[in-house]
Amino acid sequence: MKRPAAIADLLAEIFQDKPAGKRLKEGKIWLVWERSVGEQIAARARPAAFRDGTLTVSVDNAPWMQQLTYLKEEIIARLNKNIGEELITDIYLKAGSSSIPVAERPPTTTPCRIISTEEQQLIQDHTASISDPELKLLISSLMGKHLERN
């Protein structure tokens, strides 16, 4: 070996033309799903199974199933492009939960702290020149949330 290689590449080479190699290729579907369909669709639909070229996707509700029906060909093309081969030939949509299991979910919020009097004064100083009260309140709120989390 002339240079270090990624374990995934070595496994793919070792298991090429074997059932395990086929499963490794199929596993890429889950890895490229969000990148292929975008955050908005990924929040409402997730791959559930793959068999004989057909990807089964669980979708949150009927309106999204309808929308994804129209986007099937585009989704298949994007997935296959990101996988690097023509693995998926059809998508079967089924009603179900698309939510990420609790163990896999990223933390939804970070712990907040109370901002100091000095930081409140800093916010007031930075927003003092804003004449629109609604905009001033919005920017003050955003600055406060930023300071609470950092």
Image (cartoon, helix red, strand yellow):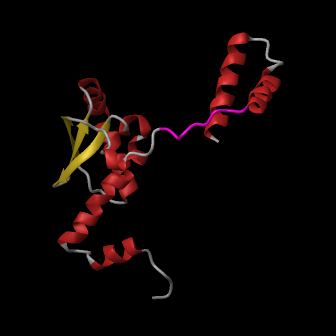
Please identify the residue farthest to the bottom as the structure is shown.
Answer: 1
Residue 50, image x and y in percent?
20, 52
Question: Can you tell which quarter of the image residue 7 is in?
Answer: bottom left
Q: In this view, does 74 lie to the left or right of 120?
A: left
Magenta: predominant secondary structure element? loop
- Image quadrant holding the C terminus, namely top right
Give the total number of marks visible in the rendering: 0
Residue 129, image x and y in percent?
83, 18
Question: Can you tell which quarter of the image residue 28 is in?
Answer: bottom left
Please identify the residue farthest to the left as the structure is shown.
Answer: 52
Q: Does the magenta stretch include residue 113?
A: yes
Residue at (26%, 52%) from the top-left corner?
Answer: 88
**Between residues 98 and 69, which one lies in front from this camera angle?**
98
Residue at (72%, 17%) from the top-left corner?
Answer: 136
- Image quadrant holding the N terminus, namely bottom left
Position above or below: 144 against 74: above
Position above or below: 42 against 49: above
Q: In this view, does 127 lie to the left or right of 69?
A: right
Q: Is residue 57 left or right of residue 9?
A: left
User: Which residues make up the magenta segment?
Assistant: 109-116
Question: Can you tell which quarter of the image residue 95 is in?
Answer: top left
Residue 120, image x and y in percent?
74, 27
Q: In this view, does 118 lie to the left or right of 149?
A: right
Residue at (23%, 39%) from the top-left corner?
Answer: 58
Q: Does the magenta stretch include residue 117?
A: no
Residue at (45%, 43%) from the top-left corner?
Answer: 107
